[in-house]
Image: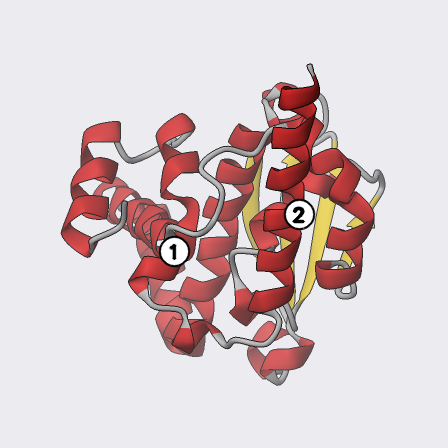
Amino acid sequence: MQSKNRGRSIARWTFVLWLIFTQFVSYDQLSAQVVSDFPEYYEASVYEPQLDSLRALYGKNLSFKFKKKLELATLLALSHYPELQQRKVKIVIRDVNGEPVEASFSPFNFIKPRKKKVYKIIIQEGSFMERLSLNKQVAALGHEMAHFVQYEQRGYMGTLFTLLGYVMSDKKRIRFEKAADKMAIDHGLGPQLLDFAFYTSDQEIKQYMDAQGYE
């Protein structure tokens, strides 16, 4: 038992040091080999004691509407996205029809400067999202956050046409979703997507990780 506790303690401090390191290194400087430095699995018993530290590092621009749930998974997913940590991210949990979890954004984002954009993740209350393991929750939320990066890269017109294609064409929708999975993998979430992914098969994930040189 002592050996097991010691192992967990080492894992916790290693992760905390990694979080501190990423605060001083921009995403552009994080090379492919750094992607593998993220944990391969998020175990609730290991990361729940780090919640206060994660709040201090990543919770400044994070807010919740209606209910405060999945905070730990959200903070862990956000730790993979340095370019989103200065954006306002809102978790909305409510009884709605539609997907169990989906990315959204303020309609005024298109006229706001980047640092004032508001991105939303809408989670259906009582859906399976709340019953998933922490690692699977991080995978699902990390996928949705990848859409935020896609929106920023595409700009106003690009996002508009992307959303039109998403609604009108199943092929374009799947292509867009798989591109988000690749984006998440590029941000160190490959092992989590192997545990839980909606659109990309394990074989496709492994092939992409091998092609990019991710372990």
* Secondary structure of the residue carrying numbered label 2: helix
Q: Residue at x 58, y 67 (%)?
A: 21
- Tell me where residue 2 appears, x and y as whole percent: 70, 20
**Residue occupied by mark 1:** 35
Q: In this rendered view, identify the residue nearer to me: 151 or 63.
A: 63
- Tell me where residue 16 appears, x and y as whole percent: 66, 53
Mark 1 or mark 2, which has the lower sequence index? 2
Question: Is 5 on the left or on the right of 26, as rendered?
Answer: right
* Secondary structure of the residue carrying numbered label 1: helix
Q: Residue at x 67, y 49 (%)?
A: 75
Q: CA distance from mark 1 to mark 2?
A: 18 Å
The disc labelled 2 sits on which kind of residue?
Answer: Trp
Crowd class of label 2 (few under 14; some 14 to 19; many from 20; radius 10 Å): few
- Tell me where residue 88 appears, x and y as whole percent: 70, 66
Q: In this rendered view, identify the residue nearer to me: 139 or 92.
A: 139
Placement of the N terminus among the 4 image quadrants: top right
- Tell me where residue 23 appears, x and y as whole percent: 62, 71
**Residue occupied by mark 2:** 13
